[in-house]
Amino acid sequence: MSHGSNDKCEPNFTPLLDLVLQLVMFFMLCANFVMDQTNVEIKLPEAVAAKAIDQTEQYVYFLNVNEQGKVIFPPNARPVDSTGKEIETSDNPEQLFIVLRNRANEDKRAAGPGNEDKPLRTLIILRVHEMCSFDKTYDIMKACRRAGYLRVQLRAILATGLEG
Amino acid sequence: MLSHNRKRQGTDFVEPDLPITPMLDMSFQLLAFFIMTFKPAPTEGQIMLTLPKEEPGGGASIPNPAAPEKPIHYIVRVVATDTGTIEKMTLSEEGSAAAVGKDLTGDIKVYRDEVRALGAALTAQKKVGKLTLEIHPKLLQAHVMGLVDHAIRAGFNDISPVPLDKKNR
């Protein structure tokens, strides 16, 4: 039985550290951060026929509608009232109409002269809580239509459709 | 200069040692944090709607260029309970002689089977269908979405949800 040299035996941590840092990076990137325009408090209904958003859409405006039918404006796209104060929520269809009309005017200006008849560039996506009643949703849809937005979509969670 | 050379020759070579252990500890802590807080976000998608016309009666606001012929227009009237669930549904065809529409009960499976049959018949006849959902104001969004979802899956592209009361359209 031979006892060899007295060299220190150390485990090689470098590949382990590489792997761990890669995992940390993965979980950091996949972390469920609050999105700019969506509201995590809105529980969406499920739908099998829902399709993912078209990536070519450049101008998308989310309107989050809570259980009581109140519109929650996205933090990075809040409108301002006549006094210059930011509007966070609105349960008044007339106020929503004014907000959307102002946005529609901006869209028309951006489209340029001669393109007034073309559909507005912004796509409105309604994220309506599953417990919100239809009359509230319809008031919002009516405000969109009055403001000139005909491209309106309803947001839903993609379901698997196993029930048939 | 001479003294400097002497000094260099006399210095022992020291291998630089990077302490990896604290870095590994921190990495494991970060990893544990992200694993514990990881919650994959549900995939969301959109359902396109046809907004009703401004005048009472409802209808398509965006003309469909792919459908030059007049679509067959079906109307589903949905009555809700006080809690916002479906109480009763009736199906009728616009211009039909029948005064009362076909009773679909309050069961969404009956509605699903009926719109599937209509969708299949339209496909066989190579015709285009349009579906107007006349919905009670109390019906919850989850049920509205269910009705629209089944209609899209049955092959209807032009679906327009409107209030039951024509005055509110």
Image (tube, helix red, strand yellow):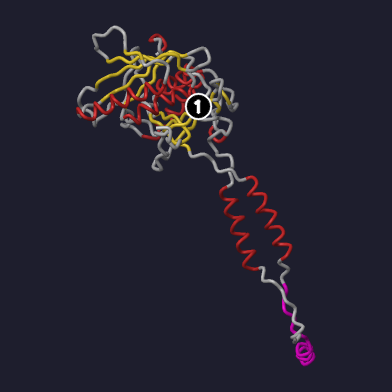
- Is residue B36 depicted above or below A78 in this figure? below
The kind of residue tagged 1 is Val
The structure residue drawn at horizontal position 74% and vertical position 84%, both measured from the top left corner, is B13
Q: Nearer the viewer, residue A1 or B5?
A: A1
Q: Is residue A24 magenta?
A: no
Q: Nearer the viewer, residue A74 or B121?
A: B121
- The residues colored magenta run B1-17
User: Is B29 on the left or on the right of B99, as rendered?
Assistant: right
Neighbours of disc 1 within 10 Å: few (<14), some (14-19), many (20+): many
Q: Quadrant of residue A144?
A: top left
Q: Which element carries disc 1, helix, strand or loop?
A: strand
Q: Label 1 belongs to which residue?
A: A128
- Is residue A139 depicted above or below B121 in this figure? above
> Residue extending furthest front?
A1
User: Is A118 on the left or on the right of B144, as rendered?
Assistant: left
Locate residue B168, reporting x and y percent: 42, 11
- Is residue A21 depicted above or below B19 in this figure? above
Mark 1 falls within which chain? A
Locate residue A155, reporting x and y percent: 46, 31
Locate residue B91, reporting x and y percent: 33, 16
User: Is A15 on the left or on the right of A134, as rendered?
Assistant: right
From where the camera sits, is residue B163 visible?
no
